[in-house]
Image (spheres, coloured by chain):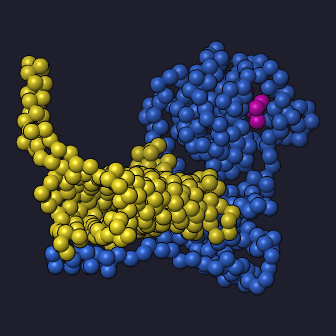
Chain colours: A blue, B yellow
Amino acid sequence: MKHILLIFITLFTLTACVEEEEFPNTAQGNFEALWKIIDEHYCFFDYKQQAYGLDWNAVYNKYKVRAKGNIDSYQLFEVFTDMLSELRDGHVNLYTSFDNGRYWKWHENYPTNFSDTLQRRYLGTDYHITSGMQYRILDDQIGYLYVGSFTYDIGEGSLDEIIKHFAFCNGLIIDIRSNGGGNLTSAETLAARFCHEKTLTGYLQHKTGKGHSDFSEMEPQYMEPSSRLRWYKPIAILTNRGVFSAANDFVKTMKCFPMVVTVGDQTGGGSGLPFTSTLPNGWTVRFSACPSYDRNCQQVEFGIAPDYEVNQTDDDFRQGIDTLIEFARKLLVK
Amino acid sequence: MKNNWIWFVFLMFLVSKAGTAVAQESSSAHIIGIGGTNILDTYISQEKYKGTGLTYLYIRERAKSGKHWSNVFEHELDLSRADDRSKTTSEIEASYNLYWGRYRSWNLLNDHLRLQAGGLVNGTLGFIYNMTSSNNPAQARVAINLMPSAIATYDFRLWKKRFDVRYELNLPLLGVMFSPNYGQSYYEIFSLGNYDHNIVPTTFISAPTFRQQITIDWRANDSFTLRVGYLGNYQQAAVNNLKQHVYTHRVLIGFVKHFEITPRP
């Protein structure tokens, strides 16, 4: 009986609370919380230190002086957004009830290379829509598929219908310009229709601790061919700087297949899987947490260069011609 | 041949029942609880969430007459909603806990005090869901724990009525739990099948989960016993550089049925 009592007293004494450091809900407290969340979870510190000299400790000193005293929420939001912009990452956002903090220079500083006015001249009004994708056959027997977003779930039945519709086409244009991403699984479902053998498409890591270099081993990512209808003929993917996140990953995957070329501008990037967290004042911060790489273990965070760099020309625009679509058509007809 | 096996199993069942034909004392309690919940999960947020929750608790205890060993089953269902301190973001927590314990008992103070000590196996299944996060909004909670446990029950009379005061304490020892790695996404675990220390052995240091309940039973008559009390369940873990706690405090009310199973001669 005494031994049993001793065991219980020992275990009870050793039982401690699992707690986390809590910052006060002040300008300074929120600043410290935000800086710490990014410091412990953001996944591109080492890469961006090499790419453009990012120093997160220097960022702390630079912005700490701006986030103190009796500044209001709007001013604090501005300080935080400026600080997060130092990461140059479209996956880093600050969500409040009055605004969304963002860094969009990765596409705002570049030509759009996409006009829905021009696209309408190619799609007409009698095009088909399924699973959020628009498609039709162009005059020269080239299939045109526009995937403006991967936020929709792409149904296997929809893909069967699209491939059947394009069965007699000589080539296929997959236009993903200004596709800002969405579900990785949707991008993978689509890509699997163009994959004909198990293919290494890239690598993925995740953080294993709070240090800037605490990462897991690189895990290879493979694409398996779809067991349903597949497309075997040449493909041209149209890209611009608005291709981001899951759409960037789609390009990364498709470039592994031999019958695929990319046409247009460099993609916008965004290769980190984002996580979110919250601040003491209730604001939500989103950040890149898990880096992915291409099949050569290279970063694609700042985008993927096209095989054929083509920009929309003013002359073509005035004539109602989409330079990128026309270039891709000629490429596929060859 | 197949029929022979069925008969053999049936006969063995009858023999085993015949061998255990001893009177059993049993009680079952249906209890509901309401009270505060405190949630922390650093995989989702560094912030603590506080709110209110409901609990349904079923306790069944069974012991053979004249024997010192008893079995206790407890089913605990919890559902909570909690807010952060700014009242801007919310989390929902739901869990099911099964406790199966086996105890040795000692009767003291002219049989007024009954002490039970033993161990129980706890299985946890649940989730925490953050209603504002879009990319890593949820955390799955799956764990199995081996917990030393003790129960003290004291019966007394007041105003010619019989009362029982019962205190139960479950302490942490060893276990195993599911956890994503520090920055590992559920997409990587379940869509890509990448394993990275996701099944984690735990001890009373890394998962100091403990639980206590104190109740007072008022035996109104032979068929009805009213139970009121407090249940505190403090589930905690610090694994894979992630911290998690779900503290629930519940005021309990329910009823207990006592019965005796007497085998036919």
Which residue ends up furthest to the right in the rendered image? A318
Q: In which quarter of the image is residue A182?
A: top right
Task: Give the side of residue A176 with respect to residue B148, left or right.
Answer: right
Q: Residue B226 placed where, x, y %?
A: 41, 58
Which residue is located at x 70 percent, y 42 percent?
A179
Residue A205: image x %, image y %? 47, 56
Quadrant position of the C terminus of chain B in the picture:
top left
Q: Is residue A16 left or right of residue A183?
A: left
Residue B264 image-quadrant placement: top left
Q: Is residue B197 visible?
A: no
Q: Where is residue B115 in the image (x, y as percent from the top left)?
A: 22, 69
The residue lying at 69 percent from left, 30 percent from top is A133
Q: In which quarter of the image is residue B237?
A: bottom left
Residue at x 17% of width, y 68% of height: B106
**Residue that lies at the very extreme toward the front in this rendered image:** B160
Q: Nearer the viewer, residue A176 or B101?
A: B101
**Does B121 sit above or below residue A87?**
above
Report how many numbered discs are placed on residues in the image: 0
**Which sits in the foreground, B195 or A33?**
A33
Report if residue A60 lies within the magenta region.
Answer: no
Kindly report the secondary structure that dominates the magenta region of the rendered protein: helix
Residue A192 visible at all? yes
Q: Give the range drawn in magenta.
A: A324-331
Give the position of the N terminus of chain B as an image quadrant.
top left
Q: In this view, does B141 lie to the left or right of A313?
A: left
B23 left or right of B37 in image:
left
